[in-house]
């Protein structure tokens, strides 16, 4: 097996902007692109291998063909033919809706799906950009319904000004929203289940308000999820991996590099995904496969990879994630 790149899946949205296409160096003329799905096995939006012997195969087909060689023995036992992670870039020209995601148990019961625990890494932020994460005060389910009804729900949400490099872990059950001017990388479980709670009374291109899921969300929300700042603190050092999230669903580290580094995966029973958020580099694995990676690109290293050497082109910032 070899390092895999995929064709991006571009999603035009009501709130999308114009940053994704130039960031990814794409020859496209689409407008209002809110998301680029980089690695996806969501039904109907499955990533397709962009080069090499497996070019044209979907990620789901790859898992079925290569099984534990691609995802690792433990992951294949745990997830079968379902690839467990979804990787996105998100560009919010306008505020996204306030929403919440169900956990594994509720998602399985209602949708026969994984839940949706996720994280954000801020790539860039316009002046005044913010992320909404959790509550600023504890509320009751009754107060929640009243505030959604009278339009004051946003008043009890925790709003956080952001800057590049900020990290937020968003567990299932945490009410959240991405604010206008935020450009983020998102790592999440493979799930497209979102309960939309509040949408600023916006109308779509046909003049209709988007569906809200006020009642469904009640069972998903953690109403005692209150903190002053939900940002993840971490040491911003160069030339060594810095772990920022370790949860049952994925482990993610940040790499800020000006020097060559070799990563040893001989004891890791998982695929590894690298997301390039700034600069460029070359990656060379133990079987002498070598690829380039630049800002806006993502690569999936199969579980058979024993080690990889990363050689920055002067400077590179990467996210590394695995299950």
Image (cartoon, rainbow, N blue to C red):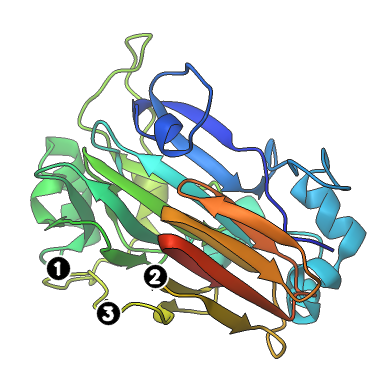
Relative depth, front residue between 125 and 249: 125
Neighbor class of circle 2 (other Cα within 10 Å; few <14, some 14-19, many 20+) is some
The relative height of residue 28 versus residue 145 in the rendered view (above or below) is: above
Residue bearing the label numbered 3: 234
Relative depth, front residue between 35 and 236: 236
Hey, which residue is sitting farthest top in the picture? 206
Is 223 left, or right, of 30 in this rendering?
left
The relative height of residue 82 versus residue 196 in the rendered view (above or below) is: below
Is 241 left, or right, of 140 in this rendering?
right
Tell me if I can see residue 254 in this picture. yes
Residue 258 - label: 2
Relative depth, front residue between 244 and 2: 2
Q: Are marks 3 and 2 in contact (CB under 8 Å)?
A: no
Hey, which residue is sitting farthest bottom in the picture? 267
Residue bearing the label numbered 1: 138
Neighbor class of circle 1 (other Cα within 10 Å; few <14, some 14-19, many 20+) is some
Is 184 left, or right, of 282 in this rendering?
left
Neighbor class of circle 3 (other Cα within 10 Å; few <14, some 14-19, many 20+) is some
């Amino acid at each position: 097996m070899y390092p895999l790149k995929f064709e991006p899946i571009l999603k035009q949205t009501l709130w999308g902007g114009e940053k994704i296409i130039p960031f990814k160096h794409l020859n496209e003329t689409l407008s209002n692109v809110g998301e680029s799905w980089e690695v996806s096995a969501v039904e109907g939006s499955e990533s397709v291998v962009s080069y090499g012997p497996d070019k044209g195969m979907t990620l789901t087909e790859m898992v079925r063909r290569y099984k534990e060689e691609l995802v690792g023995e433990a992951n294949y036992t745990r997830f079968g033919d379902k690839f467990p992670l979804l990787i996105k870039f998100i560009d919010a020209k306008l505020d996204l809706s306030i929403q919440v995601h169900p956990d594994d148990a509720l998602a399985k019961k209602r949708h026969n799906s994984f839940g949706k625990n996720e994280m954000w890494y801020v790539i860039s932020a316009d002046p005044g950009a913010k992320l909404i994460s959790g509550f600023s005060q504890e509320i009751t389910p009754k107060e929640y319904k009243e505030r959604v009804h009278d339009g004051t729900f946003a008043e009890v949400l925790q709003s956080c000004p952001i800057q590049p490099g900020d990290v937020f872990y968003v567990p299932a059950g945490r009410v959240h929203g991405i604010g206008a001017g935020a450009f983020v990388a998102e790592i999440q479980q493979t799930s497209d289940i979102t309960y939309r709670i509040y949408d600023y009374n916006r109308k779509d291109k046909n003049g209709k308000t988007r569906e809200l899921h006020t009642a469904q969300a009640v069972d998903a929300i953690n109403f005692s999820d209150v903190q002053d700042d939900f940002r993840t603190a971490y040491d911003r050092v160069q030339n060594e991996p810095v772990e920022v999230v370790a949860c049952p669903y994925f482990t993610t580290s940040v790499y800020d590099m000006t020097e060559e580094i070799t990563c040893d995966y001989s004891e890791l029973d998982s695929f590894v995904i690298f997301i390039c958020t700034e600069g460029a580099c070359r990656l060379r694995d133990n079987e002498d496969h070598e690829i380039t990676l630049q800002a806006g690109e993502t690569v999936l290293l199969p579980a058979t990879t024993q080690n990889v050497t990363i050689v920055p082109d002067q400077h590179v910032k990467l996210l590394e994630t695995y299950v």
